[in-house]
């Protein structure tokens, strides 16, 4: 190596050594600066803190249920009707609001067993399903199922719509069944119909109240024994028979002289059956 090159190499080594020395001298200063900064701002240090095991388990459980709901919703599209029916039952047992729309769609299923399962499931879900079902009352194809399903949900919002359907000719039998299934909560809404100007509506109200068997409607039903329509009188007598109160039996006795033969014969049978039940074996 020439003296010129040798000198240059020594100069480079000297320069590198100086840089290393300067960096070494600066390192403690930087470390001290960082330590001081962290001491003054402890919130910058990530502290995971204690783990909330219960909260974590809850989140995991919610995720698991969500996944299960999505699985069951997908099964509603299965080609096997038995699988679809079981999916409806499972969704009803879950009772989650997310199940409502898929179950409402299942009311249109081609298999009646799936439709029945969907109705039962929506009844189990309860109030969250009411608004969706009320909208379905406008749909002729699904109205029957919607009415029957509303009768399974004890929610005051279902009463007025069912009373409205009771007045109509097309689905009044389904509305009557739904109101009977609701039972005592429906009584207050049905009672005023006993004085409705429409004869058919009065008859339907009498039948519903008789099937509900609420003793609180005894007096209004006794009054209906005087109705001008023979079938309404007949229905009132049958309703009083179902309730089974002694006061109702006494009220039926005058029908033994009713001008309508059918009413008279029915009153005789009712009173004979009443007497038979009262006679000890």
Image (cartoon, grey):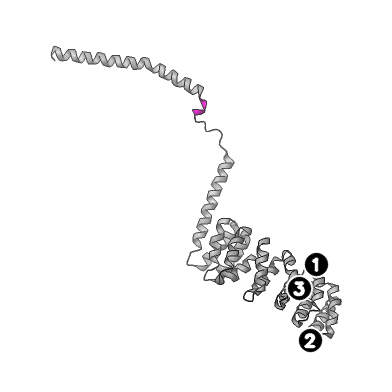
Q: Residue at x 65, y 66 (%)?
A: 161
- Using the image, tell me which numbered label, if any, was put on residue 62: none
| Region rendered in magenta | 41-46
Circle 3 sits on which residue? 195
Res. 244 image quadrant: bottom right
- Using the image, tell me which numbered label, if any, was put on residue 260: 2
In x, y percent, where is residue 26?
37, 16
Seen as rendered, the residue at the extreme front is 197
In x, y percent, where is residue 162?
66, 68
- Using the image, tell me which numbered label, if any, was put on residue 216: 1
Q: Is residue 28 magenta?
A: no
Res. 154 visible in picture = no
Res. 154 image quadrant: bottom right
Q: Quadrant of the N terminus?
A: top left
Structural crowding at the residue carrying mark 2, measured as other residues with C-alpha within 10 Å and reported as few (<14), some (14–19) or many (≥20)? some
- Helix, strand, or loop for circle 3? helix
In the rendered view, would you say 138 is above or below 52? below
- Helix, strand, or loop for circle 1? helix
Q: Residue at x 60, y 66 (%)?
A: 119
Give left or right: position of 175 versus 42.
right
- Helix, strand, or loop for circle 2? loop
Give left or right: position of 271 versus 129.
right
**Disc 1 to disc 3, how far (Cα)?**
17 Å
Sequence order check: which comes first, mark 2 or mark 1? Answer: 1
**Disc 2 to disc 3, how far (Cα)?**
22 Å
């Amino acid at each position: 190596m020439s003296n010129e090159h040798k000198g240059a190499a020594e100069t480079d080594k000297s320069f590198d050594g100086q840089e290393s020395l300067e960096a070494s001298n600066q390192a403690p200063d930087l470390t001290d600066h960082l330590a001081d900064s962290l001491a003054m701002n402890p919130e910058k240090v990530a502290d995971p803190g204690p783990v909330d095991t219960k909260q974590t388990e809850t989140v995991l459980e919610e995720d698991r249920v969500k996944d299960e709901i999505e699985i069951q919703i997908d099964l509603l599209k299965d080609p096997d009707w038995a699988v679809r029916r079981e999916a409806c039952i499972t969704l009803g047992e879950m009772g989650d609001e997310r199940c409502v729309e898929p179950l409402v769609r299942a009311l249109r299923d081609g298999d009646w067993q799936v439709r029945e399962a969907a109705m039962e499931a929506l009844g189990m879900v309860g109030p969250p399903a009411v608004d969706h079902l009320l909208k379905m009352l406008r749909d002729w194809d699904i109205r029957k199922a919607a009415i029957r399903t509303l009768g399974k949900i004890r929610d005051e919002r279902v009463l007025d719509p069912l009373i409205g359907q009771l007045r109509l000719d097309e689905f009044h039998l389904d509305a009557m069944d739904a109101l009977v299934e609701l039972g005592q909560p429906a009584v207050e809404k049905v009672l005023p119909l006993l004085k409705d100007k429409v004869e058919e509506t009065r008859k339907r109200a009498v039948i519903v109240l008789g099937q509900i068997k609420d003793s609180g409607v005894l007096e209004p039903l006794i009054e209906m024994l005087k109705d001008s329509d023979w079938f309404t009188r007949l229905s009132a007598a049958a309703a009083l028979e179902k309730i089974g109160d002694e006061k109702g039996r006494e009220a039926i006795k005058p029908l033994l002289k009713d001008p309508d033969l059918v009413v008279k014969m029915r009153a005789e049978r009712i009173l004979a059956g009443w007497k038979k039940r009262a006679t000890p074996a």
